[in-house]
Image (tube, rainbow, N blue to C red):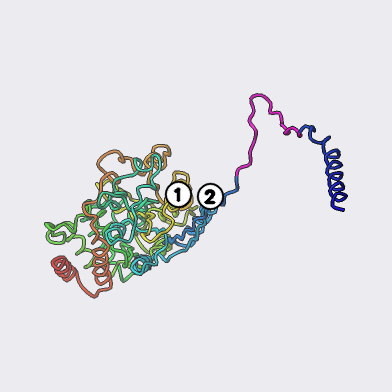
Amino acid sequence: MARRKSALVFLLLCVMVLFLSPWANVPSSPATVVPVPKGETLATEEPVVAREVSHLTVDVALEEPEFNALVLQNDEFTLRHPDIMVELTRVDPKQAYRAYKNASELDEASDIMLLSNEWVKEFASSGFLLPADAAYEGKALTEQFDAVTAPLKWNGYLWGVPRAMDPFVLIWNMDLLHQWLGEDVALPLTIEQWTDLATMSAQAAETDLPSWLTIDRNDPLSLLSWLENATAERSDGIWDEEEKPWTDTPFGQALTVIDQYKANVRFVSGIEEAEALLNGGKTLAAIVPNSLASEWMEEPRSNLEPKLEVDRHSWKLPYVWTRGSSFAISSDTAAEEAAYTWISEMTNDRNQRLNREKWGILPVYRSLYDSDRTLGNLLPGRTGQTFPNQPPLYTGPELPERLEQLAALWSRLSTGAIEAEQFKTDWSEEKGNE
């Protein structure tokens, strides 16, 4: 029985060998090769990598129309940079300093803030900002005027990137000026001529003749700008320790004129209303930003409206207050590189030209004045020792506080709470307490 089983197993093995032996010599299938034309390389698909998106928050102290224009410029930016998302917020310019400072102290500041140039050094020295040097691309740094960039420099770095400047100017009702001082009067006036105008206005007050000056009671730079025009002296050195700017000086004389004849001055809270006063023959002259003066001069005028003229003679001084603004980067930002990119494009020459054409604010690039005759005529001495080539005499971190002190004194003088002598005394006491 065992032999029979062994024979059966042997027979089955032989059958299996006979069945499988033909496949042992079958060749394997060759690999498929795709021919590549000479001079070309085989394309390969790159792996899909998600691009990291940066989020920026930007606070700007602008009026509504100018803010809306910035929104459009930002929309164009985000189309070019889909990896940067920007949230723009408008801050009331009158509340901006306090809002920015409070947010910075609480570590809640936006990534980017539009600051007045006079505030930048205080914010930088307080640790609220990052250096902004990397946002100056290409020619941006060499194009800047010293009057604009000096307030931004501290500890070897630049802490802001200038966007624009808008100095004050004097705008005259020339019909009234000729009526009061004669047809041959020439600008700028001397302090003696200003005194004559103030005296005429006081003598004619009962007949409701125009005021001799319209000026913002809340802005200390409006006072300093008028002092510069009336005395032909720069005002940025009044905080010098060796100076006594109000004692036996042209500034002291001019301040006394305002004090003695303030009943015939139009002190306004917001200079926009000066246009109606000028056109209505209610004021002889007004201190206004250059942008507003340019806008008013471009408007069509009827034969019944008075002839207006802009007086920029004080711009021939070595320095006048630029009323400039700059973008600064918060030290709390988590999107530093995106902030550099955004600021660089928002301050490029194209946007500066657009801002000039739309709003009359002045650009900060030298080359734009060289290529535009209308701009060049505004600053004919921009390559010499006049504004805006010279830095201010003082740009310390204490400047915002000192301007606030001056603003308080100016407001009290304009409302009649104090007289010129008390103004001078309080000034000396505050200066002595520094």
Q: Please tell me whether residue 286 belongs to the stretch shown in magenta.
A: no
The C terminus - image quarter: bottom left
The CA span between labels 1 and 2 is 9 Å
Report the amino acid beneath label 1.
Thr
Relative placement, left or right, of 358 versus 21 is left
Residue at 52% in and 57% down = 85
Quarter location, residue 23? top right
Where residue 9 is drawn, which disc sits there?
none
Q: Nearer the viewer, residue 285 or 152?
A: 152
Give the mark, 1 or 2, whose residue is nearer the N terminus: 2
Marks 1,2: beta carbons within 8 A? yes
Answer left or right for 319 relative to 353.
left
Residue 199 in which image quadrant? bottom left
- Mark 1 highlights which residue? 341
Residue 12 picture location, percent across and down: 86, 45
Residue bounds of the magenta highlight: 28-46
Quick check: 376 above or below 223? Answer: above
Report the residue at 57% width, 49% height from top: 49
Residue 30: say if magenta.
yes
Residue drawn at (28%, 57%), measured in percent from left and top? 121
Vertical order, 429 against 245 (above or below): below
- Can I make out residue 368 in this image? yes
- Tell me the tag on residue 81: 2
Count neighbours of disc 2 (C-alpha within 10 A) and say few if under 14, some if 14 to 19, many if 20 or more. some
- Residue 84 image position (x, y, % from top left): 51, 54
